[in-house]
Amino acid sequence: MRPKSLVVGLAATVALSLATACSSSEPDSSQAAPSSTTASARQSDPPKNLDGKVRIGIAAPVAQLILPFLADEQGDFKKHGLSNVEVSFVPGPQLIPAAAGGAVDVAISAAPSTELSALNGGALKIVGAWDKSALQFLVARNGIKSPEELKGKRVGVNGSKAGSSTILMNYALRKAGLKIEDVNIIALQDHGAQLQAYIGGQLDAMITSPPSLQRAQAAQPDTQVIRNFDDLFFPENEIIVNTKWSDNNPDQVVAVLAGLQDALQTWRTKPDLAKTLIAEKLKLDPAKDSELVNVLYENTMKIFLQNIEPLTEDETRKIFALLRDSGFPEAVDEKASTVIDGSYLEKALKK
């Protein structure tokens, strides 16, 4: 799969918009057959010509987030009338402020930083997700075999106080009878910095996900997974729109979702295409790293839904509960409906 060249302007636009965005975002810097909702069934009407640029930002180079690249490179967006789509990686701590500020139209990121930003006035709504489980793990070394043994240890998180790794670490510690104050939290800027700190011996434990998990195990062979998060509702690929853009371009929102739905079916039914994309976007050698690529693909198949689904109010309240437990009292259940909008997806799945 030949990589598509990206317009350099997005990164510059993101950087310029962060100061504005921060004022309206978060306050702290089973493989199954596809369903009957298939691409062919949804293409009875000719697509509209939607010429305006759509900027899609992806929070991290991990397999479970890169579906928009597949939709772009396989022509799914174009098939639904989008002729000018730009997809790129924007580091997680920058992505949600950039989306809230309008430098990114559509963001793909994990809960719960979007929910918190929207609660605090960010111009954001979650319009769907293609998984609802956390493919993240708490790992440790130096003989640590359980979360209960983390007291006094050096524990790494990345991103903001509302970032997914911090929220998940809080959850794991609470379930182990510990508080965040019981460990030595070391906050790193992003996934890459956290992995390097762990490999360099500066951390005893961290929240991570594939392929960083495998890289940590290779560099520090005593690394053990001491907890997963299968017990949590925790979508990692929320589809987030800037509401000023979506209000002005509802047909584009629907087309983006329809393209992603087509790409999801391709991902499920054409694993070779998906694996090629994984190797390309995660900078893996298709031959030397073929076993890792296979593992990464199989991991996605364990959590990917058969179709993109909206977030319900009940599901959003589960995310709010995690936020409240991590020190964000503004995440009250009564506001769950204000951060989600399933109307665009309903139209997209009927196309």
Image: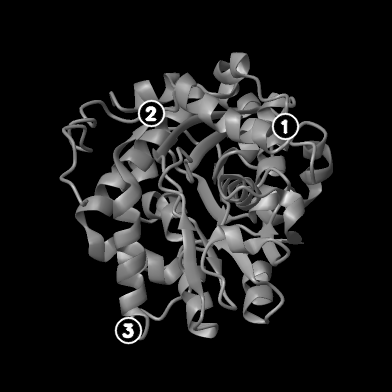
**Number of the front mark, 3 or 2:** 3
Instruction: Give the mark, 1 or 2, whose residue is nearer the N terminus.
Output: 2
Q: Position of residue 262 (x, y in %)?
A: 29, 42
338 to the left or right of 145: right
**Residue drawn at 52 percent across, 69 percent down:** 212
Q: Which residue is mark 2?
A: 48
Q: Position of residue 235 (x, y in %)?
A: 47, 41
Judged from the image, the secondary structure of the residue bearing numbered disc 2 is loop
Task: Indicate whether 114 appears above or below 226.
Answer: above
Amino acid of disc 2? Lys
> Is 232 or 150 nearer to us in this picture?
150
Q: Which residue is mark 1?
A: 328
Q: Position of residue 126 (x, y in %)?
A: 53, 30
User: How many neighbours does mark 3 have within 10 angstroms: few (below 14), some (14-19), or many (20 or more)?
Assistant: few
Q: Taking the image as drawn, is residue 107 in sight?
A: yes
Amino acid of disc 1? Phe
**Residue drawn at 52 percent across, 29 percent down:** 318
Label 3 to label 1: alpha-carbon separation: 46 Å
Asked which quadrant contains residue 22, the reply is: top right
